[in-house]
C-alpha cells in the first residue's frame, strides 16, 4: 500500500514535528532545571527528551526518511535552501510588516545561517561523491 499522499503520511509528518519539537523543548527545560539546582527534574526532562527522540526516529522510519549519506545530504541541502531562500525571508517580511523589527532581524540572520549550512552540506556532498 502506498503511503505517499495519504492522511496517514500527513499525520506521521505532524507527529514527527511534534516529537522533535518536544525533544528540543525538554532539552532546554533540562538546562534551566540544572541551572536552578533541580538535578532530579533535569534528569526527568533529559530522559523524556531521549524518549521523544526515539519516537521521532521511529516515525521517520515509517516515512523512509533516513537513507544513504548521499540522499541524506541532498535532502539536507533541499531543506536548507528552502529555509534560507524562501521560508525565513517570508517570515522576515511578515515580521517587518507587523512592526517586529527585532524578530525580522532574527529571521534575516537565521536565513544567513541556513545559507552557511547549505554550503557546508554541498561541500560534504562533493567530498562524498568523489570517494
Image (cartoon, grey):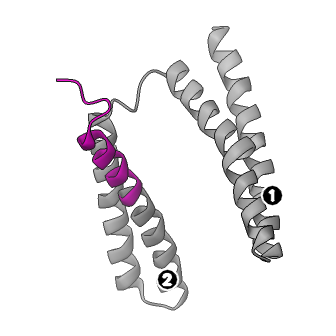
Q: Is residue 103 above or below residue 68?
A: below
- Which residue is drawn at the image coordinates 39% and 33% (left, top)? 65
Secondary structure of the residue carrying tag 2 is helix
Name the residue that disc number 2 marks: 34
Q: Quadrant of the N terminus?
A: top left
Q: Is residue 87 above or below residue 68?
A: below
If you read the primary sequence from the N terminus, does the residue marked by circle 1 or circle 2 appear first? Answer: 2
- Which residue is drawn at the image coordinates 33% and 29% (left, top)? 64
Write down the quadrant of residue 43 in the picture.
bottom left
Q: Is residue 5 magenta?
A: yes
Q: Residues within 10 Å of mark 2 (few under 14, many from 20)?
A: some
Residue 2 lies left or right of residue 36; in this view the side is left
Q: Is residue 80 above or below residue 112?
A: above
- Which residue is drawn at the image coordinates 71% and 40% (left, top)? 117
Q: Quadrant of the C terminus?
A: top right
Q: Residue furthest left?
A: 1
Q: Position of residue 20 (x, y in %)?
A: 42, 56
Residue 44 lies left or right of residue 126; in this view the side is left
Which mark identifies residue 23? none
Give the extent of the magenta segment. Answer: 1-18
Residue 65 lies left or right of residue 104; in this view the side is left
**How far is disc 1 from disc 2 in space, using C-alphas?**
32 Å
Name the residue that disc number 1 marks: 108
Q: How many marks?
A: 2
Residue nearest the viewer, comparing 84 with 125: 84
- Which residue is drawn at the image coordinates 71% and 35% (left, top)? 118
Amino acid at each position: 500500500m502506498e503511503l505517499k499522499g495519504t492522511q496517514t503520511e500527513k499525520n506521521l509528518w505532524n507527529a514527527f514535528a511534534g516529537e522533535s519539537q518536544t525533544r528540543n523543548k525538554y532539552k532546554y527545560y533540562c538546562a534551566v532545571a540544572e541551572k536552578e539546582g533541580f538535578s532530579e527534574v533535569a534528569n526527568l526532562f533529559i530522559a523524556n527528551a531521549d524518549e521523544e527522540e526515539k519516537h521521532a526516529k521511529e516515525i521517520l522510519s515509517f516515512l523512509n526518511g533516513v537513507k544513504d549519506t548521499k540522499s541524506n545530504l541532498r535532502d539536507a541541502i533541499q531543506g536548507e535552501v528552502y529555509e534560507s531562500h524562501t521560508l525565513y525571508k517570508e517570515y522576515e517580511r511578515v515580521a517587518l510588516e507587523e512592526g517586529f523589527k527585532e524578530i525580522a532581524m532574527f529571521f534575516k540572520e537565521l536565513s544567513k545561517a541556513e545559507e552557511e549550512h547549505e554550503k557546508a552540506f554541498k561541500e560534504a556532498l562533493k567530498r562524498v561523491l568523489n570517494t
